[in-house]
Image (cartoon, rainbow, N blue to C red):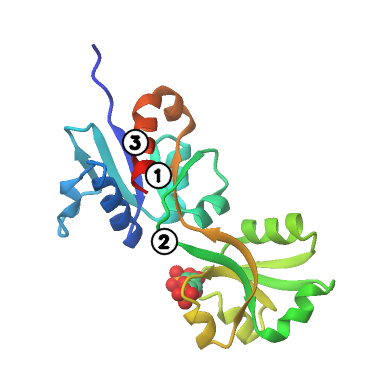
């Protein structure tokens, strides 16, 4: 009988990786090698289970999975929707819950509901475009930024922003509010489309056991 190949997981560096590993440990999938904080290794193996794990920046996780460099990935729905890669989204892990919202000063409400073209600053141009163009049939100018999005309406770059709201404290401290809800966010598990066919039994077993645990 031919030896089974390793299944590879791409996890999102930081807090989400820790939460994901703790969830996986709950179904008996451990990776002790990863617990060594001083290690410079990039890829970790659980030989016994035939699994490999690596950490990547969130936006790179769907790329690794689409190309099959990882069979399974875990990252935020925001990142997955924005990347729009050909992968299967198979499970909501319920981790890192937050919301994607249209935010701005209260004074922007009128312009937002009007018909004049307004500027929308965001790190998520695809999600913002889909919300305004497809869902709201509203023409806007999208401005792509890379961080500290809340600055944009404060310094007059845009009327509103589309951004992640978790506790709401960044908005509050900067005199901004949630004006509209775009969607709920949480961490999702994605699977490479070929792996899903070739390794169906092993992958669906992991999904099933995680589902029971969540
Ligand atoms: C995210 C998001 C908001 C903030 C929301 O930014 O873009 O700015 O967190 O969290 P809160 O509602 O709990 O205040 P992040 O810290 O990831 O940095 P960024 O602004 O550079 O994207």
Of the pair 209 and 171, the residue shown nearer to us: 209
Mark 1 element type: strand
Which residue in the structure is indicated by mark 2? 96
- Above or below for 154 versus 188: below
Question: Which image quadrant is residue 44 in?
Answer: top left
- Does the image show residue 169? yes
Q: CA distance from mark 2 to mark 1?
A: 15 Å
Q: For disc 1, does the CB lie below 8 Å from ligand 1?
A: no
Pick whichever of labels 2 and 1 is earlier in the sequence.
Answer: 1
* Label disc, if present, on residue 73 of the rendered structure: 1
Q: Is residue 71 left or right of residue 133?
A: left
Residue at 78% of width from left, 78% of height from top? Answer: 111
Which residue in the structure is indicated by mark 3? 206
Question: Which image quadrant is residue 212 in?
Answer: top left
Instruction: Look at the numbered discs 3 and 1 and tell me whether their residues touch, using CB distance below 8 Å.
Output: no
In percent of width and height, residue 28 lies at 22, 41
């Amino acid at each position: 009988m031919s030896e089974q190949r390793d299944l590879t997981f791409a996890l999102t560096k930081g807090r989400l990786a820790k939460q994901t590993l703790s969830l996986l440990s709950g179904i008996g999938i451990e990776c002790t090698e990863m617990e060594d904080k001083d290690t410079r290794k990039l890829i970790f193996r659980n030989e016994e289970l035939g699994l490999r794990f690596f950490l990547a920046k969130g936006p790179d996780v769907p790329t690794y999975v689409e190309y099959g460099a990882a069979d399974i990935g875990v990252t935020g729905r925001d990142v997955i929707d924005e990347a729009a890669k050909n992968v299967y989204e198979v499970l909501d892990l319920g981790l890192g819950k937050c919301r994607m919202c249209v935010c701005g000063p209260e004074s922007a409400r009128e312009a937002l509901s009007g018909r004049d073209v307004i500027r929308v600053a965001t790190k998520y141009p695809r999600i913002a475009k889909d919300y305004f163009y497809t869902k709201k049939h509203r023409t806007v100018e999208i401005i792509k930024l890379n961080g500290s999005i809340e600055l944009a309406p404060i310094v007059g770059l845009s009327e509103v922003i589309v951004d992640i709201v978790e506790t709401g404290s960044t908005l509050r401290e900067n005199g901004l509010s949630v004006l509209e809800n775009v969607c709920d966010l949480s961490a999702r598990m994605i699977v490479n489309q070929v792996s899903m066919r070739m390794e169906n039994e092993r992958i669906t077993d992991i999904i099933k056991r995680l589902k029971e645990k969540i």
